[in-house]
């Protein structure tokens, strides 16, 4: 029941976000590993989400209700993806961010799975599935990057000793 409710909410968000990979354009993924290598370097949950495009259940991930200051890196390759300054509570059960640290660090790709159109968010360095982006987020971007906790790792901000 919760899954159907969640899918309905996701599908009702308008999709005015444009994917950044045209049909037929190859992605330039830098980190290349075999399935065996990915399975050895990731937990089973991370492998299922990052490599098989899975999704963790809402309200279960370690970062959905987490508010420490720092950055979030790809759990597969360590590329910086999000800053805690853009994290917000969207009430959806997954960590949500209004922007990425650098647009070049993610790939946005059309996703027609589950009988609806969404925009998939992938790490540009390793091709790992992170989640999806919707256009129902807060200003100024209006975007909600809905990200699986298992696909990211948090790194606490270090205090600036020069302040």
Image (cartoon, helix red, strand yellow):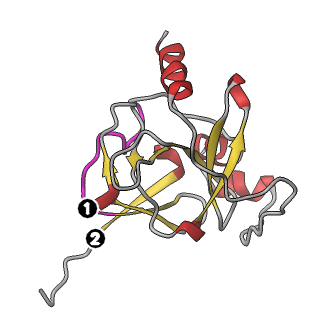
Instruction: Tell me which label, 2 or 1, sits earlier in the chain.
Output: 1
- The answer to whether any part of residue 78 appears in the image is no
Marks 2/1: CA distance?
6 Å
Residue furthest to the bottom in view is: 162
Q: Is residue 114 left or right of residue 72?
A: right
Q: Up-down: is 4 above or below 58?
A: above
In what quadrant of the picture does the C terminus appear?
bottom left
Residue furthest to the left in view is: 163
Task: Please report the residue visible at 73 percent of the width from the left and 72 percent of the height from the top.
Answer: 30
Q: Is residue 46 left or right of residue 163?
A: right
For label 2, the residue is 157
- Helix, strand or loop status at disc 1: loop
In front here: 87 or 47? Answer: 87
Residue 61 part of the magenta segment: yes
**Which picture quadrant has residue 90?**
top left
- The reply to whether dot 2 and dot 1 touch (C-beta < 8 Å) is yes
Position of residue 121 measured from the top left corner of the image (x, y, whole percent): 60, 50
Task: Please report the residue visible at 40 percent of the width from the left and 54 percent of the height from the top.
Answer: 141
Q: Which residues are magenta?
A: 60-70
Q: Up-down: is 39 above or below 45?
A: below
Residue 49 part of the magenta segment: no
The numbered mark at residue 69 is: 1
Other-residue count near label 1 (Cα within 10 Å), few / some / many at <14 / 14–19 / ≥20 = some
Position of residue 26 measured from the top left corner of the image (x, y, whole percent): 83, 63
In front here: 163 or 21? Answer: 21
Q: Is residue 1 left or right of residue 38?
A: left
């Amino acid at each position: 029941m919760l899954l159907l409710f969640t899918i309905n909410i996701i599908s009702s968000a308008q999709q005015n976000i444009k994917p950044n990979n045209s049909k037929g354009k190859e992605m330039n993924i830098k980190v290349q590993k075999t399935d065996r290598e990915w399975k050895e370097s990731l937990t089973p949950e991370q492998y299922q989400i990052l490599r098989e495009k899975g999704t963790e259940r809402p309200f279960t991930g370690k970062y959905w209700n987490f508010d420490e200051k720092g950055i979030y890196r790809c759990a597969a390759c360590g590329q910086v993806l999000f800053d805690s300054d853009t994290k917000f509570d969207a009430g959806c059960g997954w960590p949500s961010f209004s922007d990425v640290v650098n647009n070049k660090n993610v790939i946005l790709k059309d996703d027609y799975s589950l009988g609806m159109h969404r925009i998939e968010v992938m790490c540009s360095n390793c091709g790992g599935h992170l989640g999806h982006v919707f256009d129902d987020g807060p200003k100024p971007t209006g975007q909600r990057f809905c990200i699986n906790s298992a696909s990211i790792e948090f790194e606490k901000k270090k205090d600036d000793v020069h302040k």
